[in-house]
Amino acid sequence: MTPGPRNLITDVPGLLVGNAADTRLRSGSTVLTAAEPFTAAVHVMGGAPGTRETDLLAPDRLVAQVDALVLSGGSAFGLDAASGVASGLRAAGRGFAVGGMRVPIVPGAILFDLLNGGDKGWSTNPYADLGRRAFEAAAPEFEIGTAGAGYGAMTATLKGGLGSASAVLANGMTVGALVAVNALGSATVGAGPQFWAAPWEMGAEFGGLGAAQRYPQEEPKPAKRTGEATTIAIVATDAALTKAQAQRMATAAHDGMARALVPSHTPLDGDLVFAAATGARPMADPVAESFALCHAAACCLARAIARAVHAARPLPGDLQPCWQARFG
């Protein structure tokens, strides 16, 4: 495997990502979309998820493809970001055809960032507007770190953020990951700068520091209260996958989350992974190629998580230091 040219999920041809954030709110939203609908699935491993329209992603549901996937801050309020994306898609004439109507299919997931120091005293829910702005900003290039759904994210010890990474497989297929890191756990080992994801780093994409020489053995204690965490992600490929195969890729990608965040999948996190498949590349050997895609998805997600924390930047009023300020 080698990184794609951008080292972003948009190295999967046809995919676009848009971010929008509000500085005073200290929160934001991120959308992944494409010119055409794509196959999608989801797998939840955390104990406190917040989601919209994820039931329809099950392999036995009627709708086979979606128009966009949304990651957002804002806890339950942030679910309205998907409404803004749906409005943008409707204006573009997109959506599932029902008689003479089109209904955009926009599953989403949220993280909790309501206690991060931002101004949350709104009179009108701001997330529909953030979702619409993120959709309108969708492009092949996008910012990581303190951006989009990761704008106000935190981890146990350092600022979180939005991360992405990609890999091109030997068979030519591309895999990418997009993640908003707001974990109860930590992306770094102990009090040092090394990332748990170091064994999967490509080049020096998050500092090139290598792995820590010794891993701490003490029992971790939750540094956040119930409901304040959650890491939400999307893994994507240009392979032609069924919903069941996409769901298996999402399930396998959780391994990458566990490699990069310690602890992960706790009862207090809502950890979730969406999978997206554009279908541009048919699989010649579904068993062997699905095996490779699942492994690549886990590796990409681990790298994307570390890149999110590594790229976070300081802002006035931060409640936590960013990696760059402490170690960079």
Image (cartoon, rainbow, N blue to C red):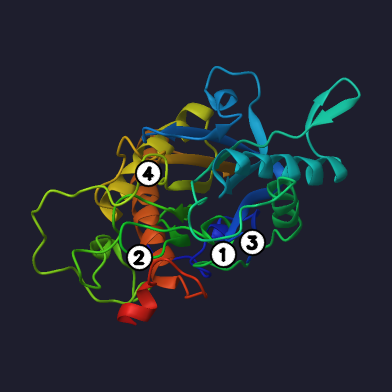
The CA distance from mark 4 to mark 1 is: 22 Å
What whole-number distance in Å separates the C-alpha atoms at marks 3 and 4?
A: 27 Å
**Residue 283 visible in the snapshot:** no
Q: Earlier in the sequence, mark 2 or mark 4?
A: 2
Disc with the residue nearer the chain's start (1 vs 3): 3
Report the residue marked by disc 1: 147
Q: Distance from label 1 to label 3 (Cα)? A: 7 Å
Q: Residue at x 52, y 66 (%)?
A: 144
Q: Is residue 259 left or right of residue 128?
A: left
Contact, mark 1 vs mark 3 (Cβ under 8 Å): yes
Q: Identify the residue position indicated by label 4 in the image.
A: 253
Sequence-first tag of 1 and 2: 1
Amino acid type assigned to the residue bearing label 2 in the image: Leu
Residue 202, given in percent of the width and then of the height, sits at 34, 69
Q: Amino acid at mark 3?
A: Ala
The residue type indicated by label 4 comes to Ala
Q: Is residue 280 visible?
A: yes
Q: Nearer the viewer, residue 60 or 78?
A: 78
> Does 81 sit left or right of 59 as displayed?
right
The residue at 52%/75% (across/down) is 316
Rate crowding at label 2 as few (under 14), some (14 to 19) or many (20 or more) other CA atoms within 10 Å. many
Q: Which mark is residue 21?
A: 3
Q: Nearer the viewer, mark 3 or mark 4?
A: 3
**Residue beneath label 2, please?**
158
